[in-house]
Amino acid sequence: MRWLILLLLLFSGCVFNSITGNIIGSSTDGPYLVINIVDGDTLDLNTTQRIRLSGINTPETSDCYYLEAKTKLNELTFGKEVRVESDKDNMDKYGRLLRYIYVDDLHVNKYLVENGYAKVY
């Protein structure tokens, strides 16, 4: 009976982490330094790799709120060390790596959506 309870607790913790987006136990790479912000959902790392934030879309250059989205991504990541997590698709059609970005415990992709800077893509 004790083993069953322990297994249930272990399983429920794994489910909780995946539902809430907690990155404990997930595979992230880094840290990498962000050296350039291209727009609200694209940045460059010190590895010469261009990263497209996976699962989100921000306004394009000619759209309203473009500058706000780019500025917020800049505030959150520029000059900071980030960790990156791969998506099921590794690269977009423009050759950018698709990644989820984390600064400390902040899930940047999620933050941008929750605060109105991006839409789920």
Image: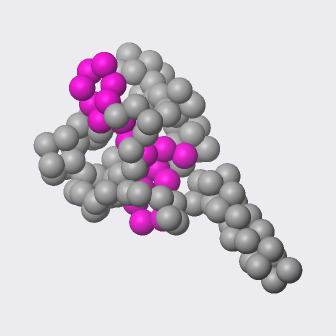
- Residue projecting furthest to the right: 1
Against 52, residue 77 (above or below) is below
Q: What residue is rendered at 54% in x and 48% in y?
A: 111
Quadrant of the image occupied by residue 39: top left
Foreground residue among 73 and 33: 33
- Residue 3 lies in the magenta-colored region: no
- Residue 102 lies in the magenta-colored region: yes
Is residue 18 rendered to the left or right of residue 88? right
Can residue 40 be seen here? no
Foreground residue among 88 and 8: 8
How many tags in the picture? Answer: 0
Foreground residue among 22 and 69: 22
Q: What residue is rendered at 49% in x and 33% in y?
A: 56
Location of residue 22 in the rendering, given as x and y in whole percent from the top left corner:
57, 60
Location of residue 79 in the rendering, given as x and y in whole percent from the top left corner:
24, 57
Q: What residue is rendered at 43% in x and 45% in y?
A: 100
- The quarter of the picture where the N terminus appears is bottom right
Q: What colour scheme does the image use?
A: one colour
Location of residue 113 in the rendering, given as x and y in whole percent from the top left corner:
57, 39
- Residue projecting furthest to the top: 62
Is residue 35 rendered to the left or right of residue 119? left
Can residue 37 be seen here? yes
Location of residue 18 in the rendering, given as x and y in whole percent from the top left corner:
62, 54
Foreground residue among 7 and 83: 7
Q: Magenta residues, as a range? A: 91-110
